[in-house]
Image (spheres, rainbow, N blue to C red):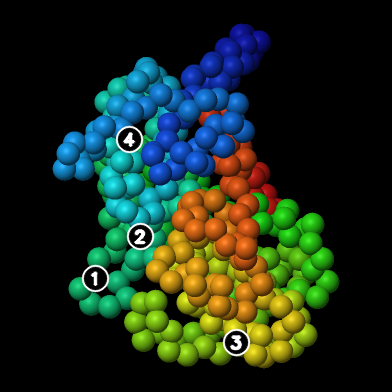
Amino acid sequence: MNFIFEFIAYLWSKTIHIVEVKLFSGVESEYLAEKIADFYGFNLGDKTLLKFSDGEMQPIINESVRGSYVFLIQSTFAPSENLMELLLMIDTVKRASAGYITAVIPYFGYARQDRKDKPRVPISAKLIANLIQAAGANRIMTMDFHADQIQGFFDIPVDHLKSEAIFVPYLETQDLSNTIFASPDVGGVKRARTYAKHFQRELVICDKYRKRANEIAGMTVIGNVEGADVILVDDIADTAGTLCRAADIIIEKGAKSVQALITHPVLSGKAHENINKSKLSRLIVSDTIPLVQQSDKIEVISTAKLFAKAIRNTHEHRSISALFVGG
């Protein structure tokens, strides 16, 4: 009798892997989705995005997804049409009887608005989480939330990938004998400490004070950087004001050089001008957001292979934490 039950369990485990996987992409994330699909060994699914003359969108899935594991790849960086397209794609495959829907969001926009830090403001990250769930997603896969607790805004599983999985192997090929890791603000200390602990290096902190969003009033370096090669670590570079101010002050404090590791290169406004004028020798970023402008100072490391592995592990019901550094 035990043999029969074991045989049934074996057949069931094999049946799980027979469920077809379908990968689709939003328009603005096709540059990354195509690389993910290539690493996965599939082609992207056939999808068309129609637009009415007023800009209204209508995504059309041109193949059957009935009963399939569907992964919809779309970062929700500006403009807001990217978020809207993702929501419409989720609704489309849900109404087409997809078996399981995972929204793969390499960059989760509005994540910086994760609390009420002043009266009469929205908690936008929570609203976006509600919208994605209401549209019909069964699971979320993303990288480096601005704050880890945003996972708690969802009532569905969240696979929160960490950029250390791509940056640490890169750094392991570099000479870090004279390196100190730094956080450009107090809020990013935990992120920078992860690298300092992994490589057994020192950690310093830049304490900043803002008058208003994207405008720094003052900054202080906590720790000794004299003669060191400093690597700043952060999740987002928007106007890059904080990053460049931190780099300049660290050099003033006697550091030999300053580089930066940034997961999400938003790089809006005068970001490129700020970076080119700053004391930053190099800015290393991921490709969760496409670069709108190239720079000799910016180097891109792809997340495609990591996301492809995470998608495969999700489909095959294997651990995602195994993909983390130290997992």
Q: Are marks 1 and 2 in contact (CB under 8 Å)?
A: no
Element on which disc 1 rests: loop
Q: Which residue is mark 1?
A: 121
Q: Which residue is mark 4?
A: 90
In the image, residue 61 lies at what x, y percent? 34, 25
Considering only order in the chain, which callout, 3 or 1, is on the residue closer to the N terminus?
A: 1
Element on which disc 3 rests: helix
Considering only order in the chain, which callout, 2 or 1, is on the residue closer to the N terminus?
A: 2
In whole angstroms, how far apart are the C-alphas of marks 2 and 4?
A: 19 Å
Q: Which residue is mark 3?
A: 249
Q: Amino acid at mark 3?
A: Ile
Give the residue drawn at x 68%, y 66%. Answer: 195
Considering only order in the chain, which callout, 3 or 4, is on the residue closer to the N terminus?
A: 4
Q: Are marks 3 and 2 in contact (CB under 8 Å)?
A: no
**Mark 2 Cα shell of 10 Å, populated few (<14), some (14-19), many (≥20):** some
Taking 9 as reference, is 163 above or below it? below
**Mark 4 Cα shell of 10 Å, populated few (<14), some (14-19), many (≥20):** many
Residue placed most toward the observer, 254 or 92: 254
In whole angstroms, how far apart are the C-alphas of marks 1 and 2?
A: 13 Å
Give the residue drawn at x 30%, y 22%. Answer: 96
Residue placed most toward the observer, 296 or 159: 296
In the image, residue 324 lies at what x, y percent? 64, 50
Taking 317 as reference, is 76 above or below it? below
Q: Which residue is mark 2?
A: 110
